Image: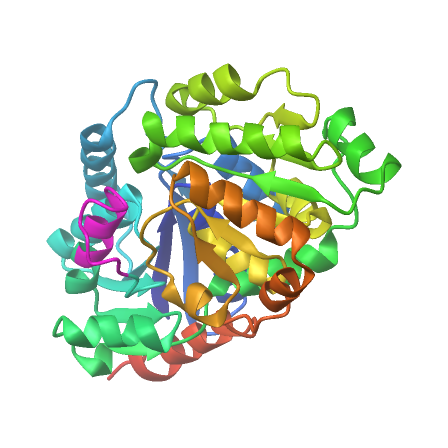
């Protein structure tokens, strides 16, 4: 029996690996275990609880004030010790986090095979997003198998000289998780703020704009511009409710509260758990975000997305028409929101565009590849 260890540390990774973990644990011929680094602690634990995943190993690296060097060193040291007592035949990592990069490097040093889920995303700019672009480029070079979400991702890898036999297009696992969550969630959790429940259920308001933002490249003037644009829209359209779960990073909290606090139809709330966020997406009119995963999730729910980034490693969404890049530019954000609020054709074109990220069967394709071609005894 082959041993597979799935390693992740952040909430986005956990969401996208959750259904793979559940299915791998049920797969004959695979002894599957889960290791979390806890690069994010509280937000990670919420996802694990929702998907009913119990880690077998927890490196618990999160500390106040940690930086990228701290995370990298702690993951490397933690996995070095783990591999002395438990040595898998393959590790599975996801995406482009520091956990993903450091775990891959630790496995490489230990001579353990690496499977990279959501491989091949590229902007072509190592500084945008930072450090994610560098992380995913490095992992692709180390990986024995690259599970790409789309054909564009596959082509990115081929252009970098990755062996085509090491690449398989699967679709994105986030759609598998989203479909599971959508069917499971019918309301907010009991922990949800009364304000948001009232906005959605009592007002029955069709125009709720859901906002998220956390990217390092938007720190400083970027977030000021974003918030100024939201303020302008809120003042012009008092009938619109802007719901903004504000990231806990002080570099996000400070400008958001400075510019937007006290505006009646702008609701600054604490970050939402994954199930509550999925339900909020379902109820929203459209989304404004700098997140990568939301560019994939929102189209699965028929929600247009305005992306507050100048570049995206997910051009499929832009090409399909489900997302538009507006950067952290005051005028582009304001004009993008205005068009979706006032132009019915524009809204319907984006809302009804084909979701380019798959059919919810990515997990099955990954496991088939592992069982059929890679974890046999050849």
Q: Is residue 162 magenta?
A: no
The front one of 39 and 158 is 158
> Percent from the top left, x then y, of residue 285?
68, 50
> Percent from the top left, x then y, of residue 250?
40, 19
Say above or below: 113 vs 80.
below
Q: Is residue 125 magenta?
A: yes
The front one of 301 and 137 is 301
- Magenta range is 122-137
Going by the image, does 9 lie left or right of 161?
right
Residue under the image location 85 percent in, 36 percent down: 203
Say above or below: 370 vs 236.
below
Residue under the image location 55 percent in, 64 percent down: 175
- Which residue is the extreme one toward the right? 202
Quarter of the rendering containing residue 328: top left
The front one of 293 and 139 is 293
Report the predominant secondary structure element of the magenta stretch: loop
Say above or below: 163 vs 259.
below
Residue under the image location 42 percent in, 73 percent down: 366
> Percent from the top left, x then y, of residue 305?
53, 53
Quarter of the rendering containing residue 349: bottom right
Quarter of the rendering containing residue 243: top right
Say above or below: 308 vs 295.
above
In this rendering, does residue 258 appear at all?
yes
Residue under the image location 52 percent in, 17 percent down: 257
> Percent from the top left, x then y, of residue 142?
16, 61
| Quadrant showing the C terminus | bottom left
Going by the image, does 366 lie left or right of 47?
left
């Amino acid at each position: 029996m082959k041993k597979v260890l799935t390693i992740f540390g952040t909430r986005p990774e956990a969401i996208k690996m959750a259904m793979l973990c559940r299915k791998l644990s049920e797969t004959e011929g695979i002894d599957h275990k889960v290791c979390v680094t806890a690069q994010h602690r509280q937000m990670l634990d919420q996802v694990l609880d929702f998907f009913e995943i119990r880690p077998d190993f927890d490196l618990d690296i999160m500390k106040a004030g940690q930086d990228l060097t701290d995370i990298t060193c702690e993951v490397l040291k933690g996995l070095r010790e783990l591999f002395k007592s438990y040595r898998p035949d393959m590790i599975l990592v996801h995406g482009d986090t520091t956990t993903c990069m450091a775990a891959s490097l630790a496995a490489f040093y230990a001579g353990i095979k690496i499977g990279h889920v959501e491989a091949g995303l590229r902007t072509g700019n190592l500084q945008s997003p930072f450090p994610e672009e560098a992380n995913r480029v490095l992992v692709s070079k180390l990986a024995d198998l690259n599970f790409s979400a789309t054909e564009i991702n596959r082509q990115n890898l081929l252009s970098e000289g990755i062996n085509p036999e090491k690449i398989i297009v699967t679709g994105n696992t986030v759609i598998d998780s989203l479909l599971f969550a959508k069917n499971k969630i019918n309301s907010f959790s009991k922990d949800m703020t009364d304000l948001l429940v009232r906005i959605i259920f009592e007002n029955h308001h069709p125009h709720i704009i859901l906002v998220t933002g956390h990217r390092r490249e938007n720190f400083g003037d970027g977030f000021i511009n974003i918030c100024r644009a939201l303020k302008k829209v809120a003042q012009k359209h008092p009938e619109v409710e802007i719901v903004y779960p504000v990231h806990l990073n002080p570099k996000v909290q400070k400008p958001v509260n400075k510019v937007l606090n006290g505006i009646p139809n702008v609701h600054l709330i604490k970050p939402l758990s994954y199930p509550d966020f999925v339900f909020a997406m379902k109820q929203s009119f459209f989304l404004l975000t700098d997140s990568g995963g939301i560019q994939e999730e929102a189209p699965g729910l028929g929600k247009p997305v305005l992306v507050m980034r100048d570049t995206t490693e997910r051009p499929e969404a832009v090409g399909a028409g489900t997302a538009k890049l507006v950067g952290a530019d005051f005028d582009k954000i304001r004009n993008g929101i205005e068009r979706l609020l006032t132009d019915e054709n524009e809204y319907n074109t984006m809302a009804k565009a084909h979701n380019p990220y798959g059919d919810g069967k990515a997990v099955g394709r990954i496991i088939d590849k592992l069982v059929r071609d890679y974890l046999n005894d050849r």
